[in-house]
Image (cartoon, rainbow, N blue to C red):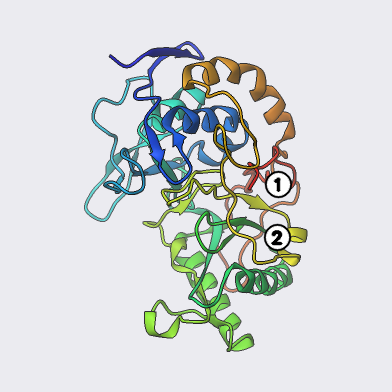
Amino acid sequence: MAPITEVEGRRVALSNLDKVLYPETGLTKGELLHYYATTAGVLLPHLRDRPVSFLRYPDGPDGQVFFSKNVPPGTPDWVTTAEVPRSEGPARMVLVQDLASLMWAANLVTEFHTHQWTAADPDEADRLVFDLDPGPPATVVHCCEVALWLRERLAADGIEAYAKTSGAKGLHLLAGVRGASSERVSEYAKALAVEAERALPRLVVHRMTRSLRPGKVFVDWSQNAARKTTATPYTVRARAVPAVSTPVTWEEVAGCSARGAVRLPHAGRGAAGPGPRRSAGAAVRAAAGVRAALTRAAAPACSRPARRLPGRAVRRGPRYRGPAPWRAGPPRPPV
């Protein structure tokens, strides 16, 4: 029987804690849960109130990997869910609102992916995203060059962008917006992607066609569609090594070198040095003490209000007040 751990008054079953999920590094499931428990203070603001799609890999990235969008069977009744619109009809999805829900979901062994809108207002996007994907031999270094161009172009329209690694090969750019539908945001994002290709023809492509992408950075604007999701900041990815989708500063982007994705430390190896293996139960019990420090380290809501998109008039909507921990998050896991 899986051990039961009490998390903020909720009973959470945490199973197979010694199971090695990442054979290349030796990272266990217990250590993965430890990571989520200790980064909850900065991760949860990006999950809260957004329907979550789970990209599950219960036997590690070398095993079966599959998306789970509906509420999984056996979900505890205290986990918050919400009805969301879909083309085939409404469905219920999970909202990860607190530490207990996060640890329950992390025990499924999953990446966390969210929409660019909240459950309370699925008809209005509050976030714009670009996924910069390099086609070999292009690398994340080339993505950084494109990201800097997009940052300046967005700033010209009064939109402040933030960057994070994808946790794979490239970068993601995100910005707060208001007063527009997902369709309108997608139109705007596509227009900027086309403009980037015209400005940087040797470096950028805005179309997904594989034959066009070698040696260039694909500026994927399509994740702004209402049905699409993007990897959440601080989620661990289902890759050969446990890479994290990590917020980075613009100074880091400008100084980008050929360095790879950020990796999680693991017991006995890596930059973190040797150390004891901690069970997820111990990590969760310790989380109450570290959460306050992590929450203090996280930046407050965007001090600069989100902008309406330029172009034709759009309906007035609530100001975006989402988190921006890119400015001051906790120490990122060492490489």
Residue at 68%, 63% in the rendered image: 159
Which one is in front, 297 or 262?
Answer: 262
Which one is in front, 108 or 159?
Answer: 108
Q: Which residue is mark 1?
A: 302
**Answer yes or no: do the residues labelled 2 and 1 have beta carbons within 8 Å?**
yes
Which one is in front, 101 or 103?
Answer: 103
Judge from the rendering whether residue 137 lies leftward or rightward of residue 75; answer left or right. Answer: right
Give the secondary structure at mark 1: loop
Q: Position of residue 168 (x, y in %)?
A: 50, 58
Q: Position of residue 26 (x, y in %)?
A: 46, 38
Marks 2 and 1 sit apart, C-alpha to C-alpha, by 10 Å
Judge from the rendering whether residue 228 lies leftward or rightward of residue 154; answer left or right. Answer: left
Q: Quadrant of the N terminus?
A: top left
Q: In the rendering, which numbered label is found on residue 177?
A: none
Which one is in front, 239 or 320?
Answer: 239
Q: Quadrant of residue 41?
A: top right
Judge from the rendering whether residue 137 lies leftward or rightward of residue 106; answer left or right. Answer: right
Judge from the rendering whether residue 21 lies leftward or rightward of residue 289; answer left or right. Answer: left
Three-letter amino acid code of the residue under disc 2 = Glu
Give the secondary structure at mark 2: loop
Three-letter amino acid code of the residue under disc 1 = Cys
Q: Is residue 315 visible?
A: no
Does 81 appear above or below 222? Answer: above
**Which of the two labelled residues, at mark 2 and mark 1, occupies the earlier sequence position?**
2
Q: Which residue is mark 2?
A: 160
Q: Position of residue 263 (x, y in %)?
A: 57, 47
Q: Position of residue 328 (x, y in %)?
A: 74, 42
